[in-house]
Amino acid sequence: MKVEDFVETLGADFYTGVPDSQLKALCNYLMNTYGIDPKHHVIAANEGNCTALAAGYNLATGKIPVVYMQNSGEGNIINPCASLLNEKVYGIPMIFVVGWRGEPGIHDEPQHIYQGEVTLTLLKDMGIQASVIRKETTEAELADIMKGYRKVLAEGKDVAFVIAKGALSYYEEVEYKNDNPMLREEIIRHIAEAAGDDMIVSTTGKASRELFEIRERSGQDHGHDFLTVGSMGHSSSIALGIALHRKDRRVWCIDGDGAVLMHMGAMAVIGANKPENMIHIVINNSSHETVGGMPTVAGEIDIVGIAHASGYPYAVCVSTPEELDRELKSAKERESLSLIEVKCAIGARDDLGRPTTTAMENKDAFVAELRKGDKI
């Protein structure tokens, strides 16, 4: 189905969400049609954030908003759906558009498998009536579904369209780019070299995939790296948990701007605890690149300033390889919590692969290295 027909049938003029590769057609359409426009389209920090934003839109206008997300974001909307939107509370209606990663029977990455199995169940448990849109779904069928949905929305209830792989199409091109010189893979190579035998926790998406391939090309094992293949926004908290309880090991967190935005409260907790053995690196391309390239607001905020305000003793922003190497070396010698924001270009190799080890194998190797020498 053409995304233009999908949008026309929904009949909404305000969209907010977190980008998803399964919804790339919708995301690119919204960027080409509206760009980032507070009246019509806002990319939020996380799915709960956009749900509350959409609730405010409904309160202000009386009109029905659309919230889009990957199904991994369902966990972030449970609280606002149950304690804000539900008809037993405020009865605020909205339409959720959910990309169905890990649909049973469709091959996907390990972090999506269980989430895919429970996607429809979670919506049902939240009292959200849901319909699956597939390649075979016709415009007439969509119109019939939407006709019924309008009655549900009029009762102050919420509805959802779960979008199967390839269900929506859009043929206009959208180019996402910035003027930063360094590519993420180059940045991660510099970090891995500086870290040496230290432990690394890397964020979800292409960052972890690139770290894995850097180790492969160098003939190194993967025991020093925890690849956070899912759970976007939580890598820094995982790193903090390790750093606080293994003061004998230095822990580097390779983070992304979209991940930092998704759960920025983690920075306050890190700054309050000030682990001397943790180095937090935020690779900032102001983009949700892994899922298509749509922009984040990270280009409009002061991440270094936020780190300082959160209690980080040291924070700096770099944009060249020379600056990066200097700050990596200094951070390793400092023995104090440090944050390095690295300005990054948008883009990755077309042949970038995925880890060839399982998530469990990665965890076991990491734990074995981390606990090496421990008395049993």
Image (cartoon, grey):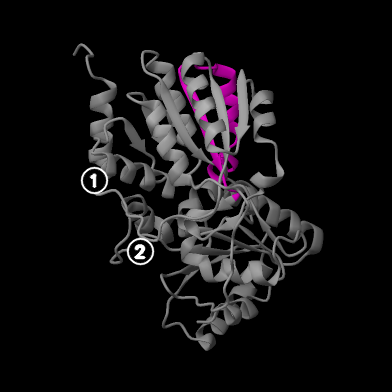
The location of residue 16, given as percent across then percent down, is 65, 59
Residue position marked by numbered label 1 in the rendering: 357
Q: Residue furthest left?
A: 376
Q: Residue at x 62, y 28 (%)?
A: 316
The location of residue 186, given as percent across then percent down, is 45, 43
Q: Residue at x 39, y 26 (%)?
A: 195
Q: Residue at x 74, y 54 (%)?
A: 56
93 is higher (above) or lower (below) than 326 = below
Question: Label 2 sits on what residue type?
Answer: Glu
In primary-sequence order, the first of circles 2 and 1 is 2
Front residue (pair 83, 25): 25
Looking at the rendering, the stretch of residues picked out in magenta corresponds to 258-286
Left of 217 or right of it: where is 2?
A: right
**Image quadrant in which the C terminus is located:** top left
Left of 70 or right of it: where is 179?
A: right
Q: Quadrant of residue 212?
A: top left
Residue position marked by numbered label 2 in the rendering: 103
Question: Label 1 sits on what residue type?
Answer: Thr
Foreground label between 2 and 1:
1
Q: Residue at x 46, y 60 (%)?
A: 124
